[in-house]
């Protein structure tokens, strides 16, 4: 009795399988006529990026604060801001890699580098590419936003927009509805607190290294025994001080001075760093105003105000 029922079940199962195979063939045949979207393969969660070592207690606290908001439900949009060279991208790169390694909370971690002039179509294409989906070239920005809305519906994702110079409309981009879900998060890096506020992000400032942290990082990278040369330590401390706690500047200058024991070369480097950092700080003062605001001034023929500040 049991054997008969088993044989009957197998025969019936075979018919069901044949029917499903036929249905799949029909769906594939119909699908070949669709040209609105092309799906290559199931999307991966994201890309792991190479990183540098993070330095400083404040940096670690910033990392922990960002991570806490990503893992919690109270904050959906996070704005990481600070002056050029402070380490915003480095911190968020570590966050990106940690998300891929340590949690199953999200289906996708999407990284997009934003150009100085915002190009919504470019951003839309990069988000779609991260999901292994191609837009047809004929579609405009509005239709793409609708397609993105459908792609992201029900997904748990983190979207990282690195290097935002002006406010970006999430509605025009096509992710505003998805962001209303607690399981979706946005992280931006920017030089401007105003941009964080305009995009309704929780602002998190990246602060410079302390004097001791900056000096320790410099010595670690320069790989010199400064005690061997009289007066060298004093000049090195002055050079580090001119780096104003910016990790990128500290590492760059230290790399240039590896193996250099000549005092005159160090004095020349001190003058060079002092000049470059001053120019960088002046430019950051302009950029922190709000990049869109500066563009408006130029359009109105008031660009001379910008140059007056830069030349001060």
Image (cartoon, rainbow, N blue to C red):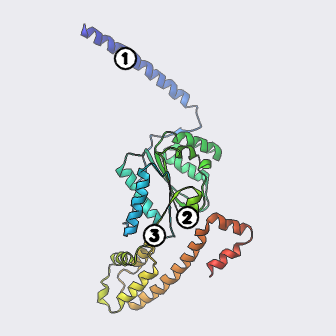
Q: Which residue is mark 3?
A: 207
Horizontal side of residue 30 vs 22, given as left or right: right
Q: State the residue at coordinates (25%, 10%).
A: 3
What is the x, y in percent for residue 195?
Answer: 58, 61
Q: Are marks 1 and 3 in contact (CB under 8 Å)?
A: no
Quadrant where the N terminus is found in the figure: top left
Of mark 1 and mark 2, the one earlier in the sequence is 1
Q: Quadrant of residue 150?
A: top right
Circle nearer the viewer, 1 or 3: 3
Q: Quadrant of residue 290?
A: bottom right
Q: Which residue is mark 2?
A: 193
Q: Which residue is mark 1?
A: 14
Task: Pick out the residue farthest to the top.
Answer: 1
Quadrant where the C terminus is found in the figure: bottom right
Question: How busy is the neighbourhood of tag 1: few (under 14 within 10 Å), some, or many (20 plus)?
Answer: few
Q: Is residue 55 visible?
A: no
What is the x, y in percent for residue 271?
Answer: 49, 86
Horizontal side of residue 180 vs 222, given as left or right: right
What is the x, y in percent for residue 152?
Answer: 52, 42
């Amino acid at each position: 009795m049991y054997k008969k029922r088993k044989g009957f079940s197998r025969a019936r199962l075979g018919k069901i399988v044949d029917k499903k195979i036929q249905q799949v063939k029909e769906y594939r045949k119909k699908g070949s006529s669709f040209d609105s979207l092309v799906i290559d393969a199931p999307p991966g969660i994201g890309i792991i990026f190479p990183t540098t070592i993070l330095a400083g207690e404040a940096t670690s606290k910033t990392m922990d604060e960002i991570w806490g908001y990503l893992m919690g439900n109270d904050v959906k949009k996070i704005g990481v801001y600070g002056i050029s060279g402070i380490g915003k991208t480095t911190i968020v790169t570590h966050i990106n890699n940690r998300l891929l390694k340590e949690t199953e909370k999200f289906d996708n971690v999407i990284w997009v580098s934003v150009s100085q002039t915002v190009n919504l179509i470019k951003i839309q294409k990069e988000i779609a590419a991260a999901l292994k989906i191609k837009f047809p070239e004929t579609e405009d920005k509005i239709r793409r936003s609708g397609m993105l809305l459908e792609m992201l519906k029900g997904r748990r994702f983190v979207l990282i927009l690195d290097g935002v110079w002006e406010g970006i409309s999430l509605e025009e981009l096509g992710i505003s509805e998805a962001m209303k879900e607690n399981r979706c998060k946005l992280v931006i890096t920017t030089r401007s607190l105003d941009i964080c506020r305009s995009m309704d992000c929780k602002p998190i400032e990246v602060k410079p290294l302390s004097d001791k942290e900056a000096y320790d990082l410099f010595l670690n990278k320069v790989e010199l025994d400064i005690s061997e040369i009289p007066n060298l330590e004093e000049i090195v401390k002055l050079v580090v001080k001119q780096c104003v706690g910016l990790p990128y500047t500290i590492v760059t200058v230290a790399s240039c001075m590896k193996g250099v024991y000549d005092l005159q070369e160090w004095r020349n480097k001190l003058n060079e760093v002092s000049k470059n950092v001053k120019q960088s700080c002046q430019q950051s003062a302009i950029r922190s105003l709000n990049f869109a605001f500066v563009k408006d001034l130029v359009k109105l023929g008031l660009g001379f105000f910008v140059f007056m500040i830069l030349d001060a």
